[in-house]
Image (tube, helix red, strand yellow):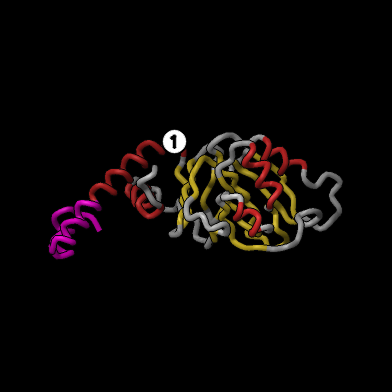
Amino acid sequence: MENLYSAVICDALDSMGYRHQALTTHFYNFTGLPRITGRCKTTLWVDMYHEDENPYELELQAVDSCRQGDILICAAGGSVRSGIWGELLTTAAMNSGCEGVIVHGCIRDIEKMRAMNFPVFATGKSPYDSQNRQRVVDIDVNVEIDNVVCKPGDIVYGDEDGIVVIPQEIEEEVIKNASEKVNAENISRDAIKAGMKATEAYQKYGIL
């Protein structure tokens, strides 16, 4: 997928009738790495307002069970109650082979994570610890962000344009169609650079 990007993946999904696979909330690449890609490893978070006897149990279990190529998805409903991801979880995740994290919520320890060269996409930041504020209630289950279902094992791809989820059952066809469109776009772009009008290029190649 090295030559692909979120927009062309969405185009391929659109052509197959999957028109709602991109997250609509804006995610920031807080550690400065512009791309994130891998397979969804899901966690479901909730806000809480009482003392938790074992606050980190499931989030640590999720991190320790990551495999090479996983992207940890933290479905926290966009909560700003605490920073649920930080330096120590990043260190553990990297040791488990995790390739990055997508947090629908807040993170902390940003400067330290940036130095670790670990892709972190999130919707906000907060210095508060998650203890007694938020917790993981389930792992390795289907989660939903912006009406997009993220299933364990689905491919997730993010860049500066946005984040898109490719259902595992159609991933081969999506990647094939997206790659073909990239090649067609290159041909059309070269023709326009050579002087062809945009209208003529679209009529000839059917690419915009």
Q: Residue furthest front?
A: 115
Find residue 83 and report its horizontal and vertical position in percent.
70, 58
Q: Is residue 189 above or below residue 94?
A: below
Q: Is residue 66 above or below residue 163?
A: above
The reply to whether the magenta stretch includes residue 138 is no
Q: What element carries label 1?
A: helix
Say which residue appears at 40% left-offset and 38% top-offset.
170
Find residue 44 and report its horizontal and vertical position in percent.
66, 47
Say which residue appears at 73% left-offset and 62% top-offset.
127
The reply to whether the magenta stretch includes residue 201 is yes
10 Å crowding of disc 1: few (<14), some (14-19), many (20+): few
Q: Is residue 199 above or below residue 159?
A: below
Find residue 59 and report its horizontal and vertical position in percent.
71, 44
Find residue 43 and report its horizontal and vertical position in percent.
65, 45
**Is residue 165 or residue 185 the one in the foreground?**
185
Residue 144 in sight in this render: no
Q: Name which residue type carries label 1.
A: Glu
Quarter of the image that includes the C terminus: bottom left
Horizontally, residue 59 falls left or right of residue 99, namely right
Q: Main secondary structure of the magenta part?
A: helix
Say which residue appears at 63% left-offset and 57% top-offset.
77
Please give the range of residues in magenta: 185-208
Residue 205 in sight in this render: yes
**Is residue 115 or residue 149 the one in the foreground?**
115
**Number of marks drawn:** 1
Say which residue appears at 23% left-offset and 49% top-offset.
184
Quarter of the image that includes the N terminus: top left
Horizontally, residue 51 falls left or right of residue 91, namely right
Q: Name the residue under label 1.
A: 169
